[in-house]
Amino acid sequence: MPATPRYKEGDSVNKRRTAGVFLEIGPAVGQVISQREKRNKKGVPCIYCTVRWEDGRSSEHAQHMLVPAP
């Protein structure tokens, strides 16, 4: 079964932060610059997004760790 992307290139997103039992939304807003499909060790395809943050950094995150920015 193919993975379905939640976000498009150019979408604004925030990163979820897990703090114990609670989920918080990070204060930094980023923009999705690219996406790629990777397979986990079970062979299930997952979508990973490369995000460019406001301060110029970029990082790659699984799409389930991102939420749309307000």
Image (tube, grey):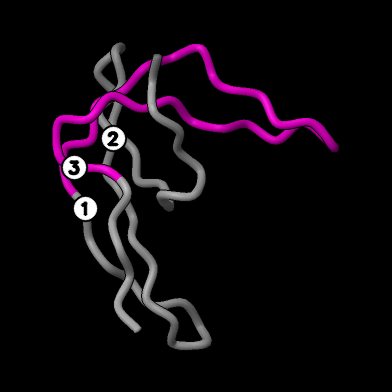
Q: Earlier in the sequence, mark 2 or mark 1?
A: 1
Q: Secondary structure at mark 3?
A: loop
Q: Secondary structure at mark 2?
A: strand
Number of other residues with Cα within 10 Å of mark 2, as a class: few under 14, some 14 to 19, many 20 or more: many
23 up-or-down from 5: above or below: above
Q: Amino acid at mark 3?
A: Lys
Q: Earlier in the sequence, mark 3 or mark 2?
A: 3
**Residue that carries the numbered disc 2 in the rendered image:** 51
The residue stretch that appears in magenta = 7-34
Number of numbered discs visible in the structure rendering: 3
Image spot of residue 55 (x, y percent): 30, 12
Along the horizontal axis of the image, is 52 left or right of 33? Answer: right
**Residue that carries the numbered disc 1 in the rendered image:** 35
Q: Residue at x 85, y 37 (%)?
A: 21
Q: Quadrant of residue 30?
A: top left
Depth order, front residue of 14/61: 14
The residues bearing labels 2 and 1 have C-alpha atoms spaced at a distance of 9 Å
Q: Residue at x 22, y 61 (%)?
A: 36
Q: Earlier in the sequence, mark 3 or mark 1?
A: 3
Quarter of the image that includes the N terminus: bottom left
The residues bearing labels 3 and 1 have C-alpha atoms spaced at a distance of 8 Å
